[in-house]
Amino acid sequence: MRASRGTHSQICDTEADAGARSRATHGRHADPGAEHRPTHGSHADLGAEHQLAHGRQADLGAEHQLAHGRQADSGIEHPLAHGNQLALKQRRPTRGHQFDFDVQRRLARGNQLTDDGQGPLKYGKQVTEGQSRPPRDKQADPGTQGSPAPAAQPHGGMQHWLARGVHTDAAGQHWLARAIAASLLACAATAASAATQLTRQDILWLDRITYGPDTAVVDQYLKLGRRKFLAQQLHPADLRPPPAVNTQITALEVAHTDPAVVLPAVIREQQRINSLTDEAAKQTERKALNDKGNRLAYEAARREILRALYSPAQLQEQLTWLWLDHFSVFQYKANDAWLVGDYAENAIRPHALGHFRDLVMATLTHPAMLQYLDNAQNAAGHINENYARELMELHTLGVGSGYTQQDIQELARVLTGVGVNTSGNEPKLKPEWQKLYRHQGAFEFNPARHDFGGKTLLGKHIDGGGFDEVEQAVDLLVSHPACAQFVSRKLAVYFVSDDPPRSLTDRMAKTFQKTHGDIADVLETLFNSREFEASLGDKFKDPMHFVISTMRLAYDGKPVANTHPVVNWLNALGEPLFGRQTPDGYPLTESGWASSGQISRRFEIARAIGSGNGGLFEPEDGSAPTTAGFPQLSGRLYYTAVEPFLSAHARTALDRAGSQVEWNTFLLASPDFNYR
């Protein structure tokens, strides 16, 4: 039975069967991840009104495991795990009532225990009148089905640690409550002294630096503090995904594919297929070859998704995605499906937090970019301006930065001969050109295709000399003040707001020029700014952020076995990895993603994740699942990083949920969760 807020339900004192879950009302179970999911609204009373301050019911019949250690006091264990604030202002139980419960309780490590319940928020939460809790689920976690039910609970509104079978009267109960309160305060003081206070700003800050906090991120933040945590994220040399995730990544074929080997082989196979005279056989074999390339592209996306979900180097993962979008390639252009994995792994990822010039050079010399923007066809006498135009407009300087059509043409001449080796063999060259030939992987600079005439770019003269012209041109582009402003604004739009203050981008651009484009230093300027701090919580999540942050909260480090659903969700939301056909990349602003259709699709994705029916834990090879996929949204992470900061609108919606699945869906699809 569910009663209205502030009232008590009269509950018959019956024996619970083994599959039943006790319903707590107007109060959260001390262990949000335990088998008994409280219902927001009514309070169990076994014969008398025993009201717990701030509406929290104690479950004193079940044995709860200790999280992060137990602290013993006077021979009675008081396990202090991460989370809750206990209030000891309460009424006495019915005189003469026989209490029979286990003394082991799981609370929250670092609790501040006070007589009135008004302590600071520690690692966990302070239980308050408006707190929103998951309802007792009608569709329980499959992993907990069949667990034994606790003994019937004589609930008096007090949280007592009593030896089994103690019998008290009213006067003794009052004394006992005071004694236990003092004992708990002493225990909590030790834990609280080491705890770090978490505020709404802390959680919102983590929501920007990461793809959304999970327990591992919160623990590391508490351990290091904000300054050291940021330093580690900006320089993540030693941060690696968990072993179980690394095992998945290293098992992928794309992790062992060399473009210098695969591209010539694909070209030869395409030529063989094209020579077939049987049209039906030609189509069948062409489809099989294309499917294999698309499989490699899927594996590349799978690798990026797994790292975004589980890598502790969360800032690097965000920057890798951002630069993949900035230096966008399209897997369905030419043979790029075979190349996007190497492009992400070797052109983007190593330089995501490095120097911008190195990032430009790495993309400029990768066959995926050269095929996508047609520079592989750019040669002396047959100029193709596509890549030169996008290199200036989209990659370095931006529209309206002062370059002209003449600059585009001159840059295109500089880039002649920069192309792709599709044969696997070096070309036959004149002796004077052989020393100018460059070859790395499937990239080559062929001097036989280069325009050696002098050029003038951005007012600077460049003598004909081969590939060193390209390096000079890139130096001119990235050292230009417009590049510093353009890149700084791009970072600020991604991390701060759709229209970032010029005061911020000016300071970032100054850092960019001072450090010769050190991305980590520019980001440090951004993250330490007052503008960044003021913007927290107001940035609308693009689809990648929405899907990844949803899964990080729902599964909290539990590795998924199948990323096809994630790829499908990103496709449905319009942001597939390597799927942007035009070179301008996906929108980074709210207007690009806040349509009614987009929000409706997000709700359906939230329902799929919240119900555990998304297929994420069904192995891709078709074998039987080895783990349940029902999300644990009512656990410690929720009460630490989400619940204390929910809006009134979100709380109202959650309170109306009729099942755990519905509650999960409402939370993950809420406006609160669509912003970071």
Image (tube, rainbow, N blue to C red):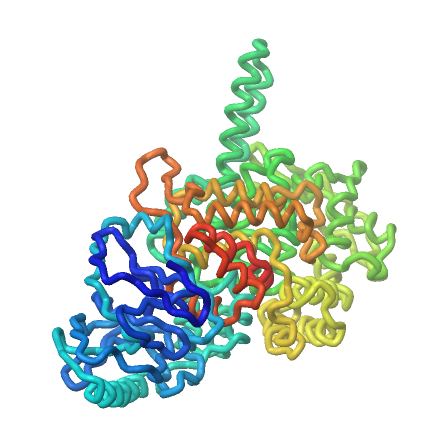
Q: Quadrant of residue 527?
A: bottom right
Q: Can residue 621 be seen by looking at this rendering? A: yes
User: In the rendered view, does 26 fall on the left or right side of 233?
Assistant: left
Q: Residue at x 65, y 72 (%)?
A: 535
Position of residue 474 relative to residue 484, above or below, is: above
Instruction: Give the total number of marks visible in the rendering.
Output: 0
Residue 36 or residue 216, whichever sits in front: 36
- x then y, percent, for residue 387: 73, 46
Q: Quadrant of residue 154?
A: bottom left
Position of residue 106 relative to residue 427, above or below, is: below
Q: Residue at x 50, y 77 (%)?
A: 199
- x then y, percent, for residue 346: 52, 51
Quadrant where the N terminus sits is bottom left
Q: Quadrant of residue 179?
A: bottom left
Q: Residue at x 14, y 79 (%)?
A: 167
User: In the rendered view, does 169 fall on the left or right side of 630?
Assistant: left
Residue 306 or residue 37, whichever sits in front: 37
Quadrant where the C terminus sits is bottom right
Q: Can residue 183 be seen by looking at this rendering? A: no
User: In the rendered view, does 394 fall on the left or right side of 623?
Assistant: right
Residue, far top: 278
- x then y, percent, for residue 370: 66, 43
Residue 7 or residue 436, whichever sits in front: 7
Q: Residue at x 76, y 54 (%)?
A: 392
Residue 667 or residue 446, whichever sits in front: 667
User: In the rendered view, does 661 fall on the left or right side of 145?
Assistant: right
- x then y, percent, for residue 281: 53, 13
